[in-house]
Image (spheres, rainbow, N blue to C red):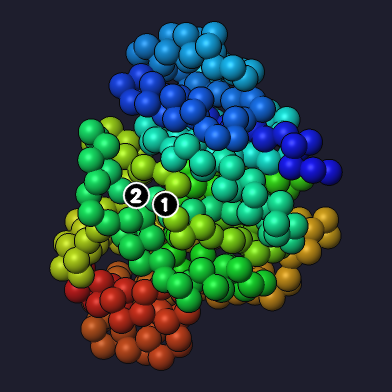
Amino acid sequence: MTSHDIKLSVALCTYNGHRYLYDQLESIANQSRKPDELVVFDDRSTDRTIEVLEQFSKRAGFPVRIHSQPRNVGSTQNFTDAIRACRGEIIALADQDDVWNHDKLECLEKLLNENPGAVMVYSDAEMVDEHLQPLGYRLWEAVGFSKRDRKILESVRGTDVLIRKFAVTGMTMAFRRVHVPLVTPIDRSWIHDGWIAFTLASIGPLIGVEKPLVNYRQHGAQQVGEKKRSIYQNYLRAKMIGGKHLFAHREMYCSIRDHLDRHQHQWPIDSLLIGQLDEKIRHLQDRIWLRENRWRRIYGFIVWASGGYRRFSFGWKSLLQDLLC
């Protein structure tokens, strides 16, 4: 099969996004490699989002399928439905408020075709403000995603990175439709991109493009964003959040552990990964216990000696947060 024969779908999820949606749609329409379809799932928008989408569909030059959810389902379920509705062999994800480089789809498709063993490709992104002005740093820099991390993701041990940090962002990724039965349904405890990246890394390599292929718009109304923070700023943020994120993360990793365990017979998932996820869950439980213990500054070093902070969190930085926040 040649690249010309391969169909490519873009899955776009929207919710009250008309303010920035036009820019994103135009960047998709201006791709050097046009999508074979744009599949849009709208989560019951109450603004002009549907109107913008319908106007765009009349002039797009490729099929635009617009689905409106019967009720508000949230972004995670919305992406599950959009991904399952795609017909192309390759699926690229899109958020409603970013702007793509004109060669994004071309680059991602080419990389997947050149690496048949890869289960996903993804790229870096330029961080911009709401007016698309550069903020002076890139996505990988903001999340502390190193060259060593990328090399590990290209190996069979990519989950060693993703079990510690959320490093691959949805609007930069593309993957193969053949893997949709493993990727979906996306558990509601997760943001869609973290779940997709982890489940796919459990069966094969993820290959990154160092070139930024997306302008990642940062604004006050978005569900998730990435800011470049100093150690002190991260401390203040952790102090404000408290320990509630640990309970949420424990639920997340329990759900993905059970999901992968159920799929071991259909997919080449290493049984050692299930054990590793069990260790991650125990580590999160240790952190919860430590934060709730009045003698935590004494017991903290006992928990540190177990090695969980180095394997599953951010080392001494996470330990200090648990001791001081």
Three-letter code, disc 1: Pro
Q: Quadrant of the N terminus?
A: top right
Dot 2 or dot 1: first in sequence order is 2
**How far apart are the alpha carbons under marks 2 and 1?**
6 Å
Q: Quadrant of the C terminus?
A: bottom left
**Mark 2, residue position:** 126
**Mark 1, residue position:** 212
Between 19 and 24, which is closer to the camera in this rendering? 24
Question: In the figure, 73 relative to 263: above or below?
Answer: above
Question: In the figure, 268 relative to 212: above or below?
Answer: below
Residue 191 in view (yes/no): no
Q: Residue at x 49, y 47 (%)?
A: 172
In the image, taking residue 127 as reference, residue 71 lies left or right, namely right
| Image marks 2 and 1: residues in contact by CB distance under 8 Å | yes
Residue 30 in view (yes/no): yes
Q: Position of residue 192 (x, y in %)?
A: 52, 44
Q: Position of residue 296 (x, y in %)?
A: 27, 80
In the image, taking residue 60 as reference, residue 235 lies left or right, namely left
Q: Position of residue 276 (x, y in %)?
A: 60, 74
